[in-house]
Image: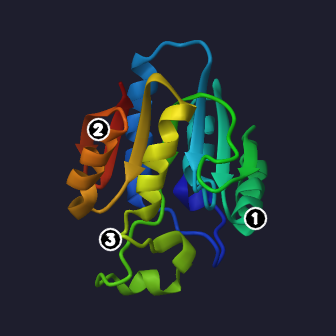
Amino acid sequence: YGRLFRVTPATLIPRPESEAIITILRGLIEQNKLLEQRLVDVGTGSGCLGITAKLEFPQLHTTLLDISQHALTVARKNAEKLDADITLLRSDLLESYADIAQYIVANLPYVDPSWQRSPETDHEPSLALFAEDSGLRLINKLLKQAPAHLAQDGYLILEADKRQHAEIVRTAQEEGFSHHKTEGLIVCLQKC
């Protein structure tokens, strides 16, 4: 689906890692036979993750969150173009989200500003790329917020640099998660 999404200077270009998140999500949904399932896409940008999940699993009640109103406008246009019935909400991570979800997916900014990076990122929005505290500021904030918005045995699926994975898993365990799996840049955590 990635090539079908409109992006602007305010949103990231969908990458193969987005497909990896959807592949992990697919496996979880297929093994979890709940009749009603909610998914929230935190920091949705163009909407690629949440909209793709909704198109592949129409039964999902899907909410897309972003702090950027411009990004939400792009996501809304993509949802309309692809006929995806989703909810959009402006929110600083999960602060404005009131429901309990079975799945939270997030491709938050995780690049430390001091890291060397590929030239292709020079044209992408810094708000969507960079985070303080070795790139973990927003991820750590989400790890603290997520337990209150995630069902028991629910899943949090994150993209992060491999150098950050051990620290993410350690922090997640302190917040009541277990490490379900890691594939490439993707970390999947389960609420205990």
Q: Mark 3, mark 1: which one is toward the viewer?
A: 3
Which picture quadrant has residue 55? top right
- Estimate the x, y position of residue 65 in percent, counting from the top left: 65, 50
Q: Are marks 1 and 2 in contact (CB under 8 Å)?
A: no
- The CA distance from mark 3 to mark 1 is 26 Å
Q: Is residue 45 above or below residue 85?
A: below
Q: Residue at x 44, y 80 (%)?
A: 121
Q: Is residue 177 above or below residue 59?
A: below
Between 45 and 168, the one lying in front of the other is 168
Q: Between label 1 and label 2, give the one nearer the viewer.
A: 2
Q: Which structural element holds mark 3? A: loop
Helix, strand or loop under label 2: helix
* Rendering coords of residue 58 (x, y %): 64, 28
Q: Which residue is mark 3?
A: 134
Q: Residue 33: x and y, percent?
A: 48, 12
Q: Is residue 146 left or right of residue 153?
A: right
In the foreground, 134 or 52: 134
Q: Are marks 3 and 2 in contact (CB under 8 Å)?
A: no
For the residue carrying disc 3, how many other residues have a C-alpha within 10 Å: few (<14), some (14-19), or many (20+)?
some
Q: Write down the residue under mark 1.
A: 69
User: Mark 2: which amino acid?
Assistant: Gln
- Identified by mark 3, the residue type is Ser
Residue for badge 2: 173
Which label was assigned to residue 32? none
Given the image, on which type of amino acid does mark 1 rest? Gln
The total number of labels drawn is 3
